Image (cartoon, rainbow, N blue to C red):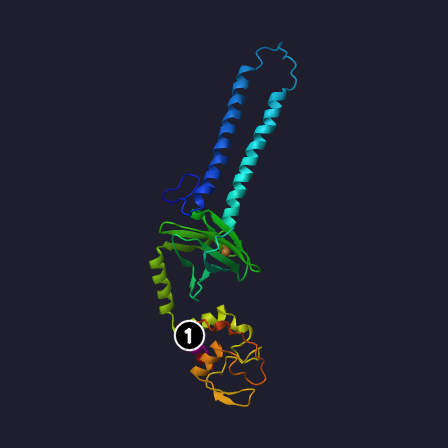
């Protein structure tokens, strides 16, 4: 239970949470009202019409059209209210605003891995800016998990063979508990994470610190994984669509136009940013120029990583 929670629900910390709670309490109080009414009349009639002596025969009773009509119409109206109301909140919960800040989430046995758009990868502790919608793009690398933040009233299954997503917006800074709510093996109950919502400036500072802390070759390894370089370039010497990274640095490259060059930092840089500039013999010019937007730091990281693969 959060600081400002009730007996039934924890603190409502996201922008959608009050709407979910309002619907919950509508159903809750309607149920209480009917429960008290039904049980009240039950007790009242049981006492009032109890059999007083053994010779008493109750008068014959036939249906009452008004009571029958009311007991069909009133519940139908209530159910339709709950349906339309619930559908509205549902649509809002599942359609993320187009300007949402996106973070990749991967569920693994038994932790959550987060990846930001600048390549920063952090386990289990996710920082998000307040005051703007956040969209989590989720998948699992092994088995089914489920991502749940009770204070935000958002929860979604995380699956190994497709992407799912959820979104939320928090307007006040705070720390929240992330749960895995799909049994995923031995340490399922220990698959706990933390979400830290903080002002934009603090969040940006945290994010750049994550980047700065990382040694270049480690950053490079992360980037190779996140950009899926390995789909074409192996790191163990085997031949792929493109040349292997192993032993690449410092080797002599043979190009299809007959020229050669020794692979140094500048050669790697050019090959990443402008892959069509020099085509290695026997390989197709298959690499897209998608990586020309890499930052200088990311480039340094990739080159440092490739250098370690001797
Ligand atoms: Cu992951 Cu339970």
Residue 34 colored in magenta in the image:
no
So how many labels did they put on this image? 1
- Give the residue at x 46% y 42%: 19
- Give the residue at x 51% y 58%: 138
The quarter of the rendered structure image containing the N terminus is: top left
Q: Is residue 124 above or below residue 11?
A: below
Query: SS of the residue at dot 1?
Result: helix
- In this view, the residue in front, 270 or 202, is 270
Q: Is residue 49 above or below residue 177?
A: above
- In this view, the residue in front, 20 or 4, is 20
Could you tell me if residue 98 is visible in this image? Answer: yes
Residue 299 colored in magenta in the image:
yes
- Give the residue at x 53% y 17%: 47
Name the chief secondary structure element in magenta: helix
Mark 1 Cβ inside 8 Å of ligand 1: no
Q: Is residue 147 left or right of residue 128?
A: right
Q: What are the residue bounds of the magenta stretch?
A: 298-306
Instruction: Write down the residue under mark 1.
Output: 301
């Amino acid at each position: 239970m959060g600081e400002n929670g009730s007996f039934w629900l924890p603190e409502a910390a996201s922008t959608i949470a009050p709407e979910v709670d309002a619907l919950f309490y509508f159903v809750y109080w309607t149920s209480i009202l009917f429960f008290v009414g039904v049980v009240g009349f039950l007790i009242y009639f049981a006492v009032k019409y109890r059999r007083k002596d053994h010779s008493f025969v109750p008068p014959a009773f036939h249906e009452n059209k008004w009571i029958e009509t009311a007991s069909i119409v009133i519940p139908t109206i209530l159910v339709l209210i709950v349906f339309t109301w619930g559908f509205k909140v549902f649509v809002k919960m599942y359609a993320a605003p187009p300007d949402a800040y996106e973070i990749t989430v991967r569920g693994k046995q038994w932790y959550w891995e987060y990846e930001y758009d600048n390549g920063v990868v952090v386990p289990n502790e996710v920082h998000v800016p307040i005051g703007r919608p956040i969209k989590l793009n989720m998948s699992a690398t092994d088995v089914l998990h489920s991502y749940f933040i009770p204070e935000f009233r958002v929860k979604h299954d995380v699956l190994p063979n497709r992407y799912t997503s959820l979104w939320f917006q928090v307007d006040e800074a705070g720390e929240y508990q992330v749960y895995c709510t799909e049994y995923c093996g031995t340490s399922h109950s220990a698959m706990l994470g933390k979400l830290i919502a903080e002002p934009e400036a603090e969040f940006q500072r945290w994010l750049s610190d994550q980047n700065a802390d990382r040694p270049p070759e480690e950053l490079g390894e992360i980037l190779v994984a996140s950009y899926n370089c390995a789909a074409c370039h192996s790191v163990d010497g085997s031949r792929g669509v493109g040349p292997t990274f192993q032993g690449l640095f410092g080797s002599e490259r043979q190009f299809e136009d007959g020229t050669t060059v020794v692979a140094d930092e500048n050669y790697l840089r050019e090959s990443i940013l402008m892959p069509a500039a020099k085509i290695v013999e026997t390989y197709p010019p298959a690499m897209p120029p998608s990586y020309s937007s890499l930052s200088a730091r990311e480039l340094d990281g990739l080159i440092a990583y490739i250098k370690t693969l001797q």
